[in-house]
Image (cartoon, rainbow, N blue to C red):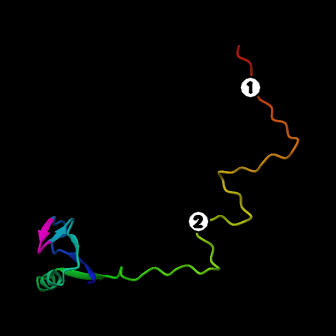
C-alpha cells in the first residue's frame, strides 16, 4: 500500500485522528480507509513515492566518498623524504 502524508487544516495540531498520529499538523499513513476519510474531511493528502528503489551506480562510476587518485587525504600528510632529520625546537625553561 502506498504511504500518504496528511496535513490537517489546523497547522499546529498535535493528536490522533482516525488512527493517525499528527505532530505540527502532519502525519503519515498507509491505511486507505483513513486516507479516504481525510480526503472527505478536507485534509491535504499527498502520496509518498518512497517505493522506488534507488538506482545502483554504474561500474564505471567511483564511489562518492573516495578521494581522486592524485589527492592525498587530509588525515595522511605526505611522508618526509629519506635522510630528513627532525629536530626539536623547544626552548629551555628560565
**In the image, what residue occupies the spot 58% across and 69% down?**
64
Above or below, 44 against 13 in this view is below
State left or right for residue 70 relative to residue 23. Answer: right
Magenta-colored segment: predominant secondary structure: strand
Please give the range of residues in magenta: 15-19
In the image, residue 80 sits, relative to residue 62, either above or below, namely above
Q: Picture quarter containing residue 46?
A: bottom left
Q: Is residue 92 left or right of residue 10?
A: right
The N terminus appears in which quarter of the rendering? bottom left
Crowd tier of the residue under label 2, counting other residues whose Cα lies within 10 Å: few below 14, some 14–19, many 20 or above? few
Question: For the residues carrying marks 1 and 2, which lies nearer the camera in this image?
Answer: 2
Residue 44, relative to residue 84: is it above or below? below
Q: Earlier in the sequence, mark 1 or mark 2?
A: 2
Q: At 71% across and 61% down in the image, what residue appears?
A: 71
Q: Which mark is residue 65?
A: 2
Q: Secondary structure at mark 1?
A: loop
Amino acid at each position: 500500500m502506498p504511504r500518504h502524508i496528511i496535513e490537517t487544516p489546523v497547522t499546529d495540531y498535535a493528536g490522533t485522528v482516525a488512527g493517525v498520529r499528527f505532530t505540527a499538523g502532519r502525519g503519515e499513513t498507509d491505511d486507505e480507509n483513513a486516507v479516504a476519510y481525510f480526503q472527505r474531511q478536507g485534509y491535504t493528502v499527498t502520496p509518498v513515492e518512497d517505493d522506488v528503489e534507488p538506482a545502483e551506480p554504474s561500474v564505471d562510476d567511483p564511489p562518492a566518498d573516495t578521494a581522486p587518485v592524485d589527492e592525498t587525504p587530509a588525515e595522511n600528510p605526505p611522508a618526509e623524504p629519506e635522510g630528513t632529520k627532525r629536530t626539536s625546537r623547544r626552548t629551555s625553561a628560565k
